[in-house]
Image (spheres, grey):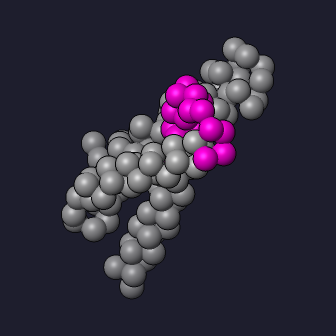
């Protein structure tokens, strides 16, 4: 079950991208929609990835990271734009979270491979 949760973001991104690409014929829109759909699953997969790799839950730190990204993004948006357009802020926040957790996902993937190689040898 854990392996399925860890692999789910890749599958969900791919399927969402292919379906959106087929329906809209617009690659940038397909990438954005796929990122929006996949973000929640990336956060969940990173949580389970950390449990598998480190035998410890880092959910509190993940939630803290989400909160800090939100505060930073809103502050920077308010400083640059003046008025806050909540739709744009939420969309931008969600996409920054996608980017941050995708990087974390890849980092955890590499750590997992290295840890497996070290344990074998």
Q: Measured along the vertical axis of the image, is residue 111 above or below residue 19?
A: below
- Residue beneath the point at 35% across and 44% down: 44
Residue nearer the viewer, 100 or 46: 100
Pick the residue in front: 118 or 81: 81
Q: Residue 22: where, in percent of width, then height?
A: 71, 18
Instruction: Say whether residue 14 is visible.
Output: no
**What residue range appears in magenta?**
79-97
Say which residue appears at 39% left-offset and 72% top-offset: 116
Q: Main secondary structure of the magenta part?
A: helix
Q: Number of callouts in the render? A: 0
Q: Picture coordinates of residue 105 (x, y %)?
A: 47, 55
Give the quadrant of the N terminus: top left
- Say left or right for 69 vs 14: left
Q: Residue 81: say if magenta.
A: yes
The reply to whether the magenta stretch includes residue 94 is yes
- The x, y position of residue 87, in whole percent, is 55, 25
Task: Give the left or right position of residue 61, taking residue 15 as reference.
Answer: left
Q: Residue at x 64, y 32 (%)?
A: 32
Residue 91: percent from left, percent from top: 56, 32
Q: Is residue 83 above or below residue 26?
A: below
Question: Outermost residue toward the front?
Answer: 82
Q: Quadrant of residue 41?
A: top left
The residue most toward the top is 23
Q: Quadrant of the C terminus?
A: bottom left
Viewer-side residue, 97 vs 16: 97
Q: Residue drawn at (25%, 55%), measured in percent from left and top? A: 60
State which quadrant residue 114 falls in. bottom left
């Amino acid at each position: 079950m854990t392996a399925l949760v860890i692999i789910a973001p890749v599958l969900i991104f791919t399927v969402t991208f292919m379906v959106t690409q087929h329906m809209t014929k617009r690659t940038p829109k397909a990438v954005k929609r796929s990122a929006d759909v996949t973000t929640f699953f990336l956060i969940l997969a990173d949580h389970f990835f950390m449990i598998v790799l480190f035998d410890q839950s880092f959910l509190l730190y993940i939630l803290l990271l989400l909160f800090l990204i939100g505060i930073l993004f809103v502050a920077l948006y308010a400083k640059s734009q003046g008025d806050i357009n909540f739709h744009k802020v939420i969309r931008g926040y969600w996409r920054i979270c996608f980017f941050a957790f995708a990087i974390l996902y890849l980092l955890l993937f590499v750590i997992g491979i290295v840890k497996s190689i070290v344990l074998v040898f």
